[in-house]
Amino acid sequence: MSALPSLTLTSSRLHEVGHQASLDHEPKDAVDDAETGVGEKNGLQQDASVAIEQDAGVDRIEALYLVFGRGWGLYLLWVSIGLIAYVYSLSRSTTAYYAAYATSSYSDHTIISTIGVINGIVAGVAPPFIAKLADLWSRPHMLTVSVALYVVGYAMCAASKNVQTVVGGQFIYTIGNTGITFLNSIIIADITSLQWRAFVDGCVNLPYVVNGFVAGYIVSDINAFSQDGWRWGYGMFCIILPVAVSPALAVLLVGDYRAKKLGAVSLASSSKSRRQQMGQATDDDGDLTLWQSIRFYWTRLNCFGLLLMGFAFALLLTPITLSTTASGGYKNPSLIAMLVIGGVLFIAWCIWDGYFAKYPFFPKRVINRTFMACVIADFFYYFSSYLVLGYYSSWVYVIVDWSDKDYGFFGNTLSVAQCAFAFLFGLAMRYTHSYKYWQIFGLAVRVISTGLTYYSAFNPSTAVLVSSQALSGFGGAVSVICSYIGVQGSVPHQDMAIATAVLNLWASLGSSISIAIASSVWNRRIPAKLEEYLGATHNATELADIFGSIYVARIAEPRDLVKRAYLEGVRGLWLAGLITSFGSLIAAFFVKNYYLDQRHNAVEGDKVVRFRNEEEIEAARAGAVRE
């Protein structure tokens, strides 16, 4: 029989076969601890697979290795992931900027900061919840729910009759969008080794390079930046995205079903979990009643902690965005109450999660030097970024006289640069087997780009604007992907999803806090500058109209004074972004430089990813089924 290339999965307690990853039980001396960092102190034994029981969702994704060992499932799954990546990138390349025009069409552009804060909080709080559900249930089921929420949210935006519906639609969409991106990245991490993970992630993001140019024509053809053109931009993806995701969902759900039917569960799981997957659960297992099931999921998902965290950050950050519109500003009793209650809830959440939660968001076993350094690096990366990006697209639209197509091209410069360079850096990490020094290099370049962004507030030439975004994409590409590699490499497979979710949480909180700060500064400084330069020729109503809509601001006269007001109004924000960008660079020096090889992670040193042939696959399947 001819050898069919495939990837297989084995560990110290199982011999599972897979379409993408094979975790082989290797001798402890096969890899030098000093070189790989396997022995990093993080509360885990080196062979963590023995000590940690895997949840059903992890078992079921590993079971796909056995079900799709013959090859067709592997290729179809990767093609499906590529299709999702392309359509999703097209969606992000076109819809990411519509909120500014949707809110402006209702003459309420300033609310975009509130949308940004709320979405940032949701994007941070949702991943731990999604990770826990994906581990307890399965990846494909959570992906299905995420797609449904994505569609509902965008449908609400497209059909909105007021700005409140836009805000509600953005909220629901953000949950679904977060789920799609998070689960897609987790599935990739599930089935790749450390040495290939950055490269594969870069490949999945390559469609942004193409769509960054295609998007400009789409935006222009549907007249998306007009009063109602953005509705078509939202509505078209209510149809396109579900169709694109369907093949991947079909592959995953069929594999999930076949795995359960064949009893192809991870032998690293508990015996009870194996019996349940095989349909052999006994009365001794004690089937749960409805109330017991509710209590089980309430505890396992740490729902109480989720509520505390969500309300705490919402109450702490939202007042910052409302301070300029609320009567009396920060002296407003409602804002004071929100800040006080938010602070109390934040302290309560820290105490609950640290001492009382049975399944905390921050399991102590995942906390290690590399994990903490990556979290801090990403927090400052997003914090410094969104001090600028919170209103950057609106600012550029007002001060630069580009066509809608050129403006669309520029809006995608950052994402195109990030994705193009992520591919190249992923390839570099594959062959250098290192990531730490690439991250330091990238963050240093990003500091330079942030300096150029600050300079653009004095000289907003096309060369300065484009080069600042291109260099920011260059540095950001390697930094973000290296943080993922560091976090996922520092924990066992069982904890990978929640560790990644925690990384996303603090990154989202960093962006939410900075958006709230940017909102406060923008809502104070821009009106003040408009009053300073236009107050003699415009009344209060006219000034409010200019500030309330970027459409009006772009055509308001005298043009040079409007531009001057917007240029001077953002200089403090841009400078703060430059200063805080050094935080992520400093944190990167404390990351442990894991050797990127065939292992799934750097903690479970006995799990190695490598190719297998068809004979080995069949033998492994037969052994797993007999077990």
Image (cartoon, helix red, strand yellow):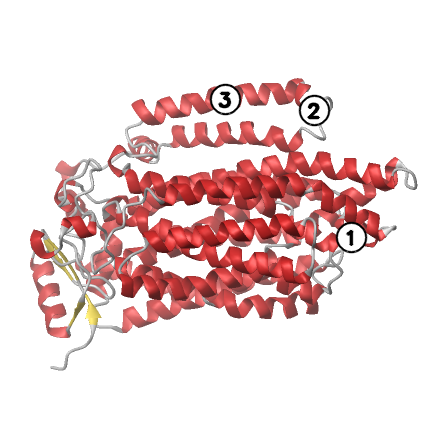
Tell me the quarter of the image containing the C terminus.
Answer: bottom left
> Which residue is disc 3 drawn over?
343
Other-residue count near label 3 (Cα within 10 Å), few / some / many at <14 / 14–19 / ≥20: some
Please tell me which residue is depicted at 18% across the width and 52% down the height of the picture: 35
For the residues marked 1 and 3, what is the alpha-carbon distance in whole angstroms?
38 Å
Mark 2 and mark 1: Cα distance apart in space: 27 Å
Contact between marks 2 and 1 (CB within 8 A): the answer is no
Looking at the figure, which quarter contains the N terminus?
A: bottom left
The residue singled out by tag 1 in the image is 551
Where is residue 372 drawn, in percent x and y? 34, 38
Q: As drawn, is 381 to the left or to the right of 46?
A: right
User: For mark 2, what is the residue?
Assistant: 329
Percent across and percent down for residue 175 are: 49, 46
Q: Is residue 272 above or below residue 4?
A: above
Residue 420 position in % (x across, y down): 46, 65
Q: The disc labelled 1 sits on which kind of residue?
A: Tyr
Seen as rendered, the residue at the extreme bottom is 2
* Residue under the image location 83 percent in, 51 percent down: 560
Q: Is residue 420 left or right of residue 517?
A: left
Label 3 – label 2 distance at C-alpha: 19 Å
